[in-house]
Image (cartoon, rainbow, N blue to C red):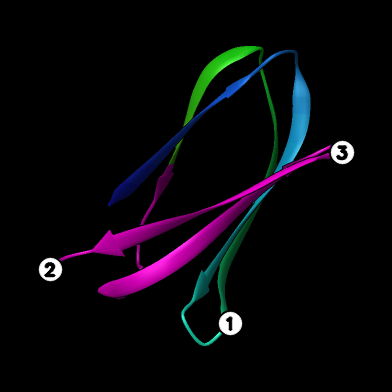
Amino acid sequence: ATQIGFTLPEDADITLTINDVSGRTLKVIRGSFARGYNTVNIKDLPAGVMYYTLKSGDFMATKKMIKIE
């Protein structure tokens, strides 16, 4: 399993999208999260380089991650 953490300034609905390096969407997670630090546990991802994008309202951030077997 992989864990992605993020901090929200207020309660918010978020969309977390995980893509492989070719841009193919591997997983989309939507949910409501509380103000402060939150984590999302993700299973069943392949090994390799991926990018995840967190969207909440007008905010959007993309980060790179590497999963090693």
Q: Residue 59 sits in which quadrant?
A: top right
What mark, if any, has residue 7 been given in the picture?
A: none
Picture residue at 51% right of the left edge, 24% below the top: 38
* Magenta-colored span: 41-69
Residue at 27%, 52% (x, y): give it.
1
Which amino acid, mark 1? Answer: Gly
- Residue located at (46% from left, 80% from top): 21
Q: Residues within 10 Å of mark 3 (few under 14, many from 20)?
A: few
Residue contact at pointers 2 and 3, CB within 8 angstroms: no
Q: Is residue 54 magenta?
A: yes
* Mark 2 to mark 3 CA distance (whole Å): 35 Å
Give me the C-alpha separation between circle 1 and circle 3. 22 Å
- Residue 42 in percent (x, y) is at 41, 52
Q: Which residue is mark 3?
A: 58
Q: As shown in the figure, which amino acid type bears the numbered disc 2?
A: Glu
Element assignment for label 2 = loop
User: Which residue is rendered at x = 35% and y = 67% of the image?
Assistant: 44
Q: Reply above or below: 7 against 45.
A: above
Judging by the rendered image, the residue that carries numbered circle 1 is 23
The residue indicated by pointer 2 is: 69
Q: Is residue 24 above or below residue 19?
A: below
In the figure, is residue 37 to the left or right of 64?
right
Q: Earlier in the sequence, mark 2 or mark 1?
A: 1
Label 2 to label 1: alpha-carbon separation: 21 Å
Disc 3 is placed on an element classified as: loop
**Left or right, 63 with reference to 35:** left
Image quadrant in which the C terminus is located:
bottom left
